């Protein structure tokens, strides 16, 4: 319910719970899950929830986590749809949205920094730099689809980092 801004906005919240609060995964495992989830079709929040649920509780855990990911938003949307339609053009609602967007950007930036730092600790600065620079240019300069960039990073990791054990 606190994931205003869509699936990507919920990633830092989910990371805090899964890694920091409950310790179900390490930061490295969580970042790998996010990378894989971004390469698959569909909403990221449901994929992450289902994966964490499966990792913790098998198929039953996956189903419960998937329901828990979808149900709050669905219930809130149904309950508040009339109110939303009534005030969607309100200047106050638009101002609130403008304030929330930078907050989401900061949360995503902090998460990116954490992923980069843990990647650096685990595989070293050379591999981290290669993957980071190639990923940046692939996405921003060459406009390659994120699916192929993530797939390329996975292949690079399998070929060059296959022997690196998780931290």
Image (tube, helix red, strand yellow):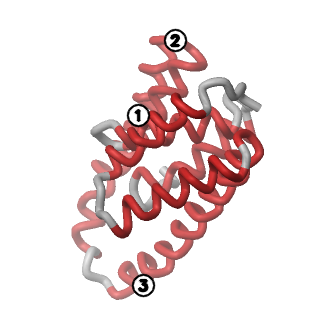
Label 3: which residue?
95
Label 1: which residue?
47
Q: Is residue 157 left or right of residue 118?
A: left
> Earlier along the polypeptide chain: callout 3 or callout 2?
2
Label 2: which residue?
58
* Residue 51 position in % (x across, y down): 48, 26
Cα gap from disc 3 to disc 2, whole angstroms: 43 Å
Cα gap from disc 2 to disc 1, whole angstroms: 14 Å
> Earlier along the polypeptide chain: callout 2 or callout 1?
1
Secondary structure of the residue carrying tag 3 is helix
Location of the C terminus by quadrant is top right
The residue at the point 39 percent across, 39 percent down is: 151
* Residue 163 position in % (x across, y down): 66, 24
* Residue 43 position in % (x across, y down): 33, 43
Give the vertical position of 9 relative to 99 (above or below).
above
Q: Quadrant of residue 39?
A: top left
> Earlier along the polypeptide chain: callout 3 or callout 1?
1
The residue at the point 37 percent across, 49 percent down is: 76
Q: Quick one: label 3, few (<14), some, or many (20+) residues within 10 Å?
A: few
The residue at the point 38 percent across, 46 percent down is: 73
Cα gap from disc 3 to disc 1, whole angstroms: 31 Å
Q: Nearer the viewer, mark 3 or mark 1?
A: 1
Q: Is residue 123 left or right of residue 137?
A: right
Secondary structure of the residue carrying tag 2 is helix
Q: Are marks 3 and 2 in contact (CB under 8 Å)?
A: no
The residue at the point 55 percent across, 61 percent down is: 108
* Residue 18 position in % (x across, y down): 65, 36
């Amino acid at each position: 319910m606190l994931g205003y801004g869509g699936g990507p906005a919920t990633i830092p919240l989910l990371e805090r719970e899964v890694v920091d609060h409950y310790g179900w995964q390490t930061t490295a495992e969580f970042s790998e899950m996010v990378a894989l989830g971004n390469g698959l079709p569909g909403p990221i929040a449901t994929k992450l929830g289902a994966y964490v649920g499966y990792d913790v509780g098998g198929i039953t855990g996956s189903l419960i986590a998937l329901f828990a990911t979808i149900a709050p938003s669905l219930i809130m949307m149904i309950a508040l749809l009339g109110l939303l339609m009534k005030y969607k053009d309100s200047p106050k609602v638009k101002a609130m949205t403008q304030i929330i967007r930078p907050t989401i950007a900061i949360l995503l930036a902090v998460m990116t920094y954490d992923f980069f730092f843990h990647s650096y600790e685990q595989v070293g600065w050379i591999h981290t730099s290669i993957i980071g620079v190639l990923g940046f240019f692939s996405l921003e300069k060459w406009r390659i689809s994120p699916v192929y960039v993530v797939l390329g990073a996975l292949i690079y990791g399998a070929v060059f980092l296959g022997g690196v054990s998780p931290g």
